[in-house]
């Protein structure tokens, strides 16, 4: 089947709203050149396709020749962007500031220096109040050029004032660059190596962070300086599995936007990511009420114009809201109730397929599989786990590992004993490739190798032994990851009590709530 995500023009057209398509048609038809009319034909043809297929495109549009297609697509792509530029100029501060700089340069080139400086003053004020220091730097640089080449006599002490402004902006941008670099490097460390698994790795990441941060924390005063500083602390805490520290800095991250609300519209992506991390920290800490409260706030934001008028924001909100909603059902043990979300999630995954990161789709599949497993529908859980195991994509090995473990347990629960030997060997081979298995993973691994072939009565004592071993590691923060991906303890307890997993979790949830209320 053709992969519709491979053609950039097709992606762009499919991302357009109805109003944007209408605006494009009006924009192009103002010029009636034959080439422009042909790109409208190409636009309509691509818009009607569900999947991009060049052979079908050419067959159904004989007036478009194969030799022309590459140039037509490039021209169409450019024209669509130009039409979008016209209707979005007032809603994006970057575009507004860029346009003002263009106007200042036009006036400068015509020798109208005072008018150019007036535009630059306005641009500087807008850039400063919206924390857009890169544009502020451009405006100051251009202003210095005008003042150094021409005697404008605009104001007294202009040289000293501009020099001071330039120094302050450069220092701030340098600090933001250093902190954003560190944030990215920490994120890369997590992607490549995952969580710290022992004291040495924990010490290494702390030293890495402290050496590169230095005394920068005390220098942070502006929005972006604090934003990237908090992100650095968040990633460090997350890698170390220090979820209390992670919560504290995700909350600081979100509070930044509460202090400067206009930045939500300017940096919507950072706000959404911050809310996602905050909800994730509540889940990691088992803070059900705080997760519920934050979900309510985030849902209100998801329904706002800022989100509804931007496809990227809509997709990110869909992903993060529904992941946290599923997490809420995990905490409650309400798996059967949570399964009511699946049809809508599946529909949106199909609708947003060309935009979504594949890893994100597989995370949804894993969580959905866990919901079916927890509700006792092992057959459907296996179907979703097969999607993960059989999807040939470069993926963090931890998700693949736990998908295989859950897949094996689901087959055991479903009574497919004839294939257990094969599955155990398969999981063994996969886990053997992983380096630095956690203690919990090692214990699960040993159990799988020696116990799944036992009878129902014979396996119960082995489950009791495994439960005793694993409970010793529940308070070890280096073992947190294993329990987050696969609540093996609740599964063992469900087997020993002969009740569904969700009943065990519901009982734990009720007990915890009664303890809080008491």
Image: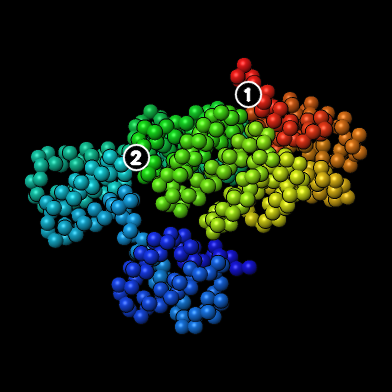
**Image position of 483 (left or right of 157):** right
Residue in the image at 48% along x and 49% along y: 314
Q: Position of residue 220 (x, y in %)?
A: 37, 32
**Image position of 182 (left or right of 87):** right
Asked if 382 appears above or below 511 in the picture, the reply is below
Image disc number at residue 513 = 1
Residue matched to label 2 = 262
| In the foreground, 332 or 102 | 332
Residue 267 visible from this viewpoint: yes
Quadrant of the image for the N terminus?
Answer: bottom right
Q: Position of residue 38 (x, y in %)?
A: 40, 78
Residue in the image at 33% along x and 68% along y: 27
In the picture, residue 170 is in which quadrant? top left
**Image position of 433 (left or right of 215):** right
Q: Position of residue 11 (x, y in %)?
A: 49, 63
Asked if 261 appears above or below 475 in the picture, the reply is below
| In the foreground, 341 or 118 | 341
Residue in the image at 26% along x and 55% along y: 99
Q: CA distance from mark 1 to mark 2?
A: 37 Å
In the picture, residue 378 is in which quadrant? top right
Kindly state the secondary structure of the residue where label 1 is placed: helix
Q: Position of residue 79 (x, y in %)?
A: 37, 68
Is tag 1's residue or tag 2's residue first in the polypeptide sequence? Answer: 2
């Amino acid at each position: 089947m053709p992969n519709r995500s491979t053609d950039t023009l097709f992606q762009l057209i499919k991302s357009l709203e109805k109003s944007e398509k209408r605006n494009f048609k009006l924009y192009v038809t103002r010029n009636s050149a034959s080439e422009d009319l042909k790109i409208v034909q190409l636009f309509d043809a691509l818009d009607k396709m569900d999947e991009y297929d060049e052979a079908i495109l050419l067959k159904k549009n004989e007036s478009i020749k194969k030799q022309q297609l590459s140039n037509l697509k490039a021209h169409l792509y450019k024209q669509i962007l130009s039409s979008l530029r016209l209707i979005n100029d007032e809603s994006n501060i970057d575009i507004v500031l860029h346009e003002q700089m263009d106007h200042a340069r036009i006036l400068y080139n015509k020798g109208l220096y005072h008018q150019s400086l007036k535009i630059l003053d306005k641009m500087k004020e807008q850039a400063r109040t919206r924390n857009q220091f890169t544009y502020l730097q451009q405006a100051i640089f251009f202003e210095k050029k005008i003042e150094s080449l021409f005697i404008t006599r605009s104001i007294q002490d202009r040289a000293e004032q501009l020099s001071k402004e330039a120094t302050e902006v450069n220092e701030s941008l340098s600090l933001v660059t250093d902190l954003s670099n560190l944030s990215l490097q920490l994120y890369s460390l997590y992607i490549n190596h995952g969580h710290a698994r022992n004291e040495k790795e924990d010490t290494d990441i702390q030293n890495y962070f402290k050496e590169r941060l230095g005394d920068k924390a005390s220098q942070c005063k502006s929005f972006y300086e604090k934003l990237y500083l908090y992100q650095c602390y968040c990633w460090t805490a997350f890698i170390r599995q220090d979820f209390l520290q992670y919560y504290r800095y995700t909350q600081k991250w979100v509070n930044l936007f509460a202090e400067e609300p206009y930045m939500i519209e300017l940096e919507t992506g950072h706000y959404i990511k911050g809310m996602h991390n905050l909800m994730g920290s509540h889940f990691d800490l088992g803070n059900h009420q705080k997760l519920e409260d934050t979900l309510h706030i985030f849902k209100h934001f998801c329904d706002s114009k800022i989100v509804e008028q931007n496809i990227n924001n809509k997709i990110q909100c869909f992903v993060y809201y529904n992941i946290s909603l599923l997490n809420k059902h995990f905490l409650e043990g309400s798996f059967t109730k949570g399964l009511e979300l699946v049809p809508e999630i599946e529909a949106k995954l199909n609708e947003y397929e060309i935009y979504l990161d594949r890893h994100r789709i597989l995370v949804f599949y894993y969580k959905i599989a866990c919901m079916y497993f927890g509700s006792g529908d092992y057959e459907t859980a296996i179907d979703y786990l097969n999607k993960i195991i059989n999807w040939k994509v470069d993926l963090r090995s931890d998700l693949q590992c736990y998908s295989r473990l859950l897949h094996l347990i689901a087959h055991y629960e479903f009574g497919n004993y004839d294939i257990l030997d094969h599955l155990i060997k398969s999981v063994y081979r996969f886990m053997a490739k992983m380096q630095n298995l956690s203690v919990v993973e090692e214990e699960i691994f040993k159990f799988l190798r020696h116990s799944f072939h036992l009878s129902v009565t014979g396996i119960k004592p082995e489950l009791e032994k495994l439960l005793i071993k694993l409970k010793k590691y529940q308070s070890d923060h280096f073992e947190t990851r294993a329990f987050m991906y696969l609540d093996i303890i609740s599964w063992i307890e469900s087997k020993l009590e002969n009740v569904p997993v969700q009943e065990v979790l519901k009982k734990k949830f009720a007990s915890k709530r009664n303890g809080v209320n008491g």
